Image: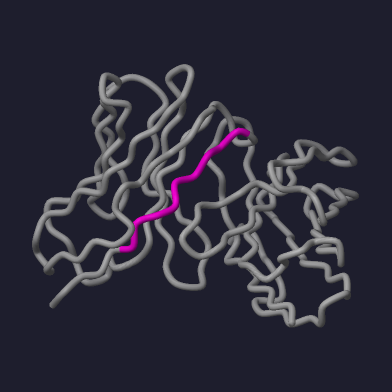
Amino acid sequence: DGGITQSPKYLFRKEGQNVTLSCEQNLNHDAMYWYRQDPGQGLRLIYYSQIVNDFQKGDIAEGYSVSREKKESFPLTVTSAQKNPTAFYLCASSIGTSPLHFGNGTRLTVT
Amino acid sequence: AQSVTQPDIHITVSEGASLELRCNYSYGATPYLFWYVQSPGQGLQLLLKYFSGDTLVQGIKGFEAEFKRSQSSFNLRKPSVHWSDAAEYFCAVGAGNNDMRFGAGTRLTVKP
């Protein structure tokens, strides 16, 4: 079955370390997205990519970086510059005007 | 600026009772409108969407929503709630997928 795989499900890091979250899709979707979810808040867009080798900043890109070297993959790096990195991170994809299709998320805890 | 408001943070209903979750939005034109559901620790699943046409849209799991332009609302309804409907529900609006705005969510608890 096609879908989006986010790994790992839980991730723990020490403050000051960069960490990379994986997102892989086999839906043949062109566009991919990263969202951050905090308790009591809606999802906020970090970065998105509409085609390979191109990506755009979302509303809260500071302290994050991405790459899109393959259509299937859109990894997110949370850098040490991100002041409050502990959150639930969701990856999504879409094709054309279809609604967003989400992965099951990665919960990142930084101490 | 576009925004989405879900006025109810938490709602409790009895199993078998009807449900209405509220969503109000602020947007320059008629946006695309969505309702998603999220179980704890999971991603979001699309319940239904409105792009144009009939203002009453049917979704999965027996849910429906009605777009009311005059009230800038897109409320989600279900005639009879099941225990498995307990989850968090998000309303989202936007002109495209890179332009989506999500509400803060409404957590639904279902009493036996």
| In the image: residue A47, left or right of residue A70 | left
Residue in the image at 11% along x and 68% along y = B14
Q: Residue furthest left?
A: B17
Residue A28 visible somewhere in the drawing = no
> Measured from the top left, where is residue B52 in percent x and y?
38, 21
Residue B7 seen in render: yes
Q: Quadrant of residue B39?
A: bottom left
B4 horizontally vs A68: left or right = left
**Vertical order, A69 against B54 (above or below):** below
Along the horizontal axis of the image, is A69 left or right of A105? right
> Is the N terminus of chain B in the top left, top right, bottom left or bottom right quadrant?
top right
Question: Residue sitting at 29 percent across and 29 percent down?
Answer: B67
Q: Which quarter of the picture shows residue A19?
A: bottom right
Q: Give me the residue at 24% from left, 30% from top.
A: B56
Whole-percent x, y for residue A61 in the image: 77, 48
Name the quadrant of the C terminus of chain B: bottom left
- What span is in magenta? B99-107
Which colour assignment does the render follow?
Answer: one colour
Q: Exactly how many numbered labels are in the figure?
A: 0
Residue extending farthest front: A83
Above or below: residue A1 compared with residue A59: below
A63, above or below B25, in the image: below
- Residue A10 percent location from the top left of the image: 66, 79
User: What percent of the width, then of the height, locates residue B30?
Assistant: 42, 20
Which residue occupies the foreground of this view, B38 or B24?
A: B24
Magenta stretch contains residue B101:
yes
Q: Quadrant of residue B16?
A: bottom left
* Residue A61 within the segment the image draws in magenta: no
B36 or B24, which is in the foreground? Answer: B24
**Which residue is at 57% across, 66% downward?**
A104
